[in-house]
Image: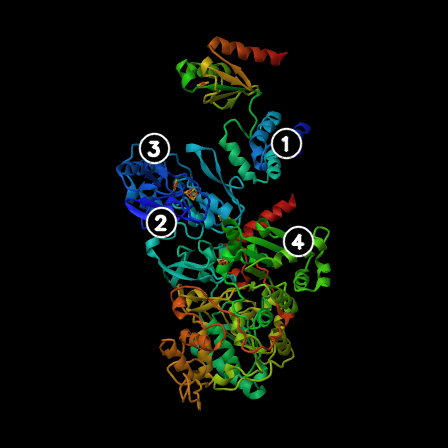
Amino acid sequence: MADVTLTVDGKKLTVPAGTLLIEACKSTGIEIPSFCYYPGLSLQGACRMCLVEVEKMPKLQTACTTPVAEGMVVTTESDKIKQARKAMLELVLANHPLDCPVCDAGGECELQDMTFKYGAAESKFMDLKNHRDEQQWSPVVYFDRPRCILCYRCIRVCGEGMDVWALGIQNRNVGSVIAPNKEDHLECEECGMCIDICPVGALTSGAYRYKTRPWEMKHVGTVCTHCGDGCKTTLGVRRADTGMEIVRGDNRDKSGINGDFLCIKGRYAFDFANSSDRIQQPLIKHEGKFVAATWEQALDRIASKFKQVLASDGPTAVGVIGSNRTSNEENYLLQKFARLVLGTNNIDHHRTADFPAFASALAGNANATASMRDVFDAPAILLIGNNPTDQHPLLAWQIRTNVRLHRAKLYVVNSYPIKLRRQAAAFAQIASGSEGSVAQFLGGNDAAGDAAVTPQFSREALSQLRDELKNEKDLVVIFGSELRGNDVTALVNFGLAQGAKFICLGDYANSRGAADMGLYPDMLPGYAPVASATSFHEDWVDEIPKSPGLDLLQMVDAAKEGKLKALYVVGSNPIARYNVDPFALSKAFVVVQDMFLTETASIADVVLPIANAYEKGGTFTNTCGDVQMLKKAGEFAGVRNDFECIVRIADRMGYDVHKLVPFGGGGTRADMGQSRGAQSGEADRHAVWLAEHNLEPKMSPYDPTAMLDEIQRLVPGYDISRLGLLSGHDEHTQLVQITGATGSGHPELVLPSNDTLFTSGTLGRYSPTLNSVMERYSTTAAQVAGD
Amino acid sequence: MKFSDQLEQRFATMVTHYPTKRSVLVPMLLYIQDELGAVTDEAIHEIAQRTELTDLEVRNVISYYSMLRTRPVGKYNLQVCTNVSCLLRGADDIFEHCKKKLGIGNKESTPDGLFHLEEVECIGACSWAPALMMNYEFHENLTPAKIDELIDGLKKKEEQ
Ligand code: SF4
Ligand code: SF4
Ligand code: SF4
Ligand code: FES
Ligand code: FES
């Protein structure tokens, strides 16, 4: 748009036409006080705090609703304005309870700040205040009516932002009051957006209210550990008996890919970390009962037993199951441990998407994956399968916001009438389970289209959809785990031909990381087949076993037959997730690293108490391939992180850990015989890479960044900006394969978690917040059904 | 809820008068109230569905307008204006008289369900102040005697 030049407080500035005066002022460092204005939401003009003088306009104007105009002369500080602001604040405070000493928002309240900066120290109001008791609207949302300043932010964010429309306004003028959709309570997505957007303490959360004062917490920005979207969440921690307790989650650090957004899980379901069910000591099973043990005893027992099995039955008799919620460093270390220390390819994890098929379909094409940020401003989006509102709340937010603010064109193909159809320009409700056929049809297989047709969705409509999609430039194609194997290939081929970018949806915080880091029996990190010659083969000192190992279900079968004698489970609960008969594992020696005595941990021989993702450093890769740093926020006495445990077990087994973790120099294979280039002579490749990247060698085998160095050096796509990562930015990786070989997808092993907004795998079961919300909605449902 | 034929017809014609469906909300609420005596929960739900709004949004609108109500009031709704013009011409006394005569206060109904009394802002009859509205009927240049006449007349009509 054309630019407009105006004068603000004597300063000339040029901004694009259509810019709001308040934003124009902000861009030149002039603060206009405001309550109701909120970037990205519709304009309200309710609070009158943003009044400014505009030359030739008789009355003060609201800067939040006035667009700039050519030659405008604006004054933002004058006696008249000062007086107006004072009067506005006096009105706002007229019925405000001023209970700041006990208000959650005290110390970080916009009303306090405004009154401090612009307010009058006196009030002419002598009337009695109109008191109302605090109300609980849901397990999450509480409302303290007298504190409300009627800025309407909560209503707008819930309606426009969340597309839930659960909040409204009743009555008018002084009698106006924010109201929930079910008269005295809420039925909604419980995201807490309304609570955090409230400038005062009128909306408060069940999780945090009356718990502490804001200044008593330390704030740590890290990554949510629930779904695969990778929201940045700021955790407020304070000292507790068990270490550092997490008392609050929010997103005041709006630098993350999620901007303003967090769902209930990122905001409130950190509470599993404070659960009294957590294991605080290593446990060794003795005559069928767990007995608390020291770390030394437990590690010794594990190491000696692993060695014993290796000696008697060889490496094929041991297996490893990794996790979707451990860091990239831990996943990478775990598969390296399996392959080099145990000497086996028997390693797998709970797969929630067919990432190998996706990687192989992309066939090394660069710039073919979309980041979570791309979804926010792509001009067109195709969503096949999945229900992001439940399973990928941030993705759903990005799509909704893009449609709302940038008028993106959304195509939704699904066998259910998912909520995002409300934003769709075209919604195709196809026959149940025919997502794969649609992918094939798009890919050019006309016959496959028949399977998708329903009485409401005709063959012609399907063809029209394909034609329209073909005309979309810069399309982002997002698909759920309904698509696997060949269907993924067909869809990718269709999109690549027109330069589309893709997102393959996997379910947990680091599902993509687990896949990228090679928690597969037949693939190394970067989806390289184990048998092919890769840089890992060149680099690692010990041999990688050549033949593919057993997958998760095969391992269970082998254990049942007594062939698999030892199983090492890190942060996974296969017994519950895959419905495994616990008895199947009774003959094997089972080691479990977990926070809780899950179904799998209960049948283990040794259990190690483990720190969760909020209690350690490392990196996560979200489902789009955006890598972010974890920062340690909480602390829980008695636990260790998975990384340390794996290294220590290797050490106890007599393995030289230098060969596992590149620390302190040595351990990696030196290059001989090259005469040119950075890697000439006998240089240590790792040292050369570090020097090239201006990084120091790490000094401790327990330092996960040492592993990150190796990941960045060896795993295709991961050579991203360390500087960006360290400063808390998300860095997008490109899925680039090591070799052109096809990764065998094993679509039958993909088991989507089907989490809802209020569940989160095994972890979610230990969150009191999620439990209370689920209980609430299940009883409401039962009542309705009983009618 | 099922709309009566009359409401059904009104909705069908009025919905064509506006560019968006939601615009028909306020007039429809008035027609519903005339027919049912109040906008009931069922009616709220029905009109919300038809205008593609949430029940909450319909409630927001009802609560904004004092002439819309969710609970039925007495058969004869006396709305006495006490705004400036009427005030200057003795509306306060008129209102007090109504209270005494009916034995009820502001926004209350008589036990027999016949009368409802309400103090309201300007009803646009300033030139003939003080004024009141009985349902949709205007009564102007009021005096206590005129009030008695009105109320007694209505009572008598009911007794017959
Ligand atoms: S918690 Fe979320 S969905 Fe519920 S009322 Fe608040 S903003 Fe709306
Ligand atoms: S509850 Fe908070 S966000 Fe909502 S209108 Fe009141 S002050 Fe604004
Ligand atoms: S959308 Fe996913 S990553 Fe974001 S807060 Fe919710 S569960 Fe966490
Ligand atoms: S910020 Fe402008 S009126 Fe509220
Ligand atoms: S003031 Fe009473 S009718 Fe106008």
In the drawing, does residue B143 fall left or right of residue A454? left
User: Mark 1 belongs to which subunit?
Assistant: B
Between circles 2 and 4, the one closer to the viewer is 2
Mark with earlier residue (2, 4): 2
Residue A109, numbered label: none
Which kind of residue does numbered mark 4 sit on? Gln
Q: Is residue A497 above or below residue A57?
A: below
Relative vertical location of residue A447 with respect to residue B126 in this rendering, above or below: below
- Secondary element under disc 1, as helix, strand or loop, is helix
The amino acid on which the numbered mark 2 sits, given as a three-letter code, is Thr
Foreground label between 3 and 2: 2
Between marks 3 and 2, how big is the CA–CA gap?
24 Å
Tell me the residue that label 4 is attached to.
A429
Q: Which residue is mark 3?
A: A58
Image quarter (top left, top right, bottom left or bottom right) of the C terminus of chain A: top right
The lab-note entry on whether marks 3 and 2 share a chain reads: yes
Residue placed at 54% from the left, 39% from the top?
A: B56
Can you give x and y, in whole percent of width and height, for residue A527 in the image?
A: 55, 75
* Mark 1 surroundings within 10 Å by alpha-carbon count, few (fewer than 14), some (14 through 19), many (20 or more): some
Q: Is residue A734 above or below residue A147?
A: below
Distance from the alpha carbon under mark 2 to that under mark 1: 51 Å
The CA span between labels 4 and 1 is 31 Å
Q: What amino acid is found at the position of numbered circle 3 in the picture?
A: Pro
Amino acid, disc 1: Phe
Q: Which residue is mark 2?
A: A14
Give SS at disc 4: strand
Query: Quarter of the image holding residue A57?
Result: top left
Report if the beta carbon of the residue with label 1 is closer than 8 angstroms to ligand 1. no
Q: CA distance from mark 3 to mark 1?
A: 44 Å
Depth check: A323 or A728 in front? A728
